């Protein structure tokens, strides 16, 4: 038995539109991929995109550690 959705006033207007879709379309909407743009996640994604587009060098920029600093070793 399918119950008719009539009172959806407790839902956000965007959710009301989705709730009124036919079953197949509603499932397609629910199963769709989504990205929640948290500030830190957006910054991390931007950094990864920059590294992905970086020209091919033998040594890529350091992502997790401080930049490499070359120091002389004292051979005494």
Image (spheres, rainbow, N blue to C red):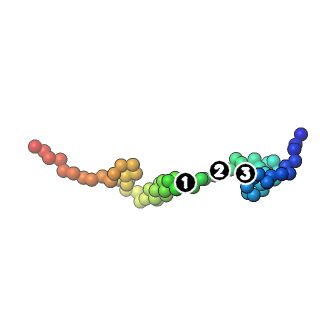
Q: Residues within 10 Å of mark 3 (few under 14, many from 20)?
A: few
Residue situated in front as seen by the camera: 58 or 34: 34
Element at label 3: helix
Looking at this rendering, what residue extends furthest in the front direction?
A: 10
Give percent across and percent down for residue 64. 39, 49
Instruction: Judge from the rendering whether residue 42 lies leftward or rightward of residue 72; answer left or right.
Output: right
Instruction: Judge from the rendering whether residue 70 lies leftward or rightward of residue 39; answer left or right.
Output: left
Element at label 1: loop
Instruction: Judge from the rendering whether residue 8 lies leftward or rightward of residue 38; answer left or right.
Output: right
Q: Quadrant of the N terminus?
A: top right
Give percent across and percent down for residue 3. 87, 44
Q: Residues within 10 Å of mark 2 (few under 14, many from 20)?
A: few
Ranked by sequence position, the earlier of labels 1 and 2 is 2
Ranked by sequence position, the earlier of labels 1 and 3 is 3
Query: What's the residue at 32%, 53% (across, down)?
Result: 67
Give the residue pinned by disc 3.
29
Asked whether the residues under the numbered discs 1 and 2 touch, taking CB atoms below 8 Å apart as contact, a structural biologist would say: no
Query: What's the residue at 72%, 51% (across, down)?
Result: 29
Element at label 2: loop
Query: What's the residue at 13%, 44% (across, down)?
Result: 75
Looking at this rendering, what residue extends furthest in the left direction?
A: 76
Looking at this rendering, what residue extends furthest in the right direction?
A: 1
Give the residue pinned by disc 1.
38
Q: Is residue 59 visible?
A: yes
Give the residue pinned by disc 2.
33
Residue situated in front as seen by the camera: 5 or 26: 5
Residue situated in front as seen by the camera: 39 or 50: 39
Q: Nearer the viewer, mark 1 or mark 3?
A: 1
Compute the Cα span from label 1 to label 2.
16 Å
Give percent across and percent down for residue 52. 47, 56
């Amino acid at each position: 038995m399918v119950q008719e959705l009539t009172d959806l006033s407790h839902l956000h207007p965007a959710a009301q539109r989705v709730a009124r879709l036919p079953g197949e379309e509603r499932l397609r909407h629910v199963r769709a991929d989504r990205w929640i743009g948290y500030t830190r996640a957006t910054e991390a994604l931007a950094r990864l995109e920059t590294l992905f587009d970086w020209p091919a060098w033998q040594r890529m920029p350091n992502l997790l550690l401080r930049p490499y600093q070359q120091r002389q070793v004292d051979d005494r």
